Amino acid sequence: MVGIYLSGTGNTKHCVEKMAKLIDNDAKCYPLEHPQIIDILNTQDTVFLGYPTQFSNAPFMVRDFINRNASLWNGKKVFLINTMGLFSGDGTGCSARILKRYGAEILGGIQVKMPDSVCDSKLLKKSLEDNKRIIKEADERIERVAVQIKEGNFPREGLTFIAHIKGLFGQRLWFYRKTTGYSDKLKIGDACVGCGLCSEECPMNNIQMDGKKAVPGNQCTMCYRCISLCPRKAITLLGDTVQEQCRFEKYTQ
């Protein structure tokens, strides 16, 4: 088995790596943007796929990756791990429905509450201690689910018809225009000093350096990786000011 993930602030990376190691200590995990990801997936029958929820939907980068590599999924066994700040609905189901269309067998899914990762909004922000508690509870859930899976009992969170209705009417219909494609709304302000970190870390290669200035393109997948890492807090997306840089490691120190 192999774990693959899209992770902006580190939440999903942690969940996929923890789950994979608990089930198979020899399992390897890779980010979706890894240059050899297709070759890696071609050698594996079982895939644990993780990503954060965006407005009760899978990120467009994840859906785009699945669609662009349609033949890759035929016969694959896939377990979905979806992280969320508050509400997911059918976050796992959004990818499961596409994967099944291409011949994948969906083993199950889990939707894990983690610290909010939208750095430029005051909504859902919690204290350091609250976020540490959320991670502790998430780890305990993952440990319980790993035991279930090893016994052959796969949870099916987000994969039912009821979950589909909840996700559709809970958020996805109202915010669908935000998730129909990549975004061109990323903003890089005058505080940018041209360190290049955002350009190096962007999973979509969406940020280029123009001299000593970072310039965004129109292929943002809204993962918040660059915003959470920028040393000058110069980057925003949905809001206009960075409220908190929500890196996973901040809550585990």
Image (cartoon, rainbow, N blue to C red):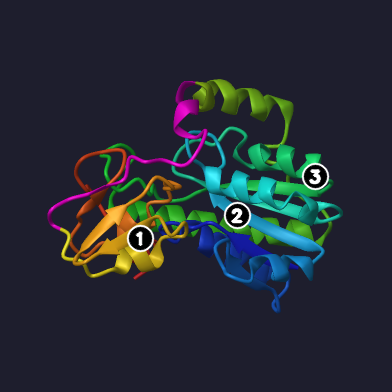
Q: Residue furthest front?
A: 210
Which residue in the structure is indicated by mark 3?
102
Q: Residue furthest right?
A: 75
Residue neighbourhood size for the residue with mark 3, other residues' Cα within 10 Å, grouped as few (<14), some (14–19), many (≥20): some
Asked if the residue under mark 3 is in contact with the one under mark 1, i.e. CB atoms within 8 Å, the reply is no
Residue occupying the point 65% across, 48% down? 110
Tell me the kind of residue under disc 1: Arg
Residue neighbourhood size for the residue with mark 2, other residues' Cα within 10 Å, grouped as few (<14), some (14–19), many (≥20): many
> On the image, which quarter does residue 239 sit in?
top left
Among numbered discs 1 and 3, the one appearing first in the sequence: 3
- Horizontal relation, residue 178 to residue 214: left or right: right
Residue occupying the point 45% across, 38% down? 86
Is residue 206 one of those drawn in magenta?
no
Among numbered discs 1 and 2, the one appearing first in the sequence: 2
Residue occupying the point 51% across, 42% down? 53
Disc number at residue 59? none
Q: CA distance from mark 1 to mark 2?
A: 17 Å
Is residue 177 one of those drawn in magenta?
yes
Give the extent of the magenta segment: 174-191
Please say if 215 is above or below 165. below
Which residue in the structure is indicated by mark 1?
247
Residue 20: give x, y in percent of width and height.
66, 67
Tell me the kind of residue under disc 2: Gly
Q: Residue furthest bottom?
A: 26
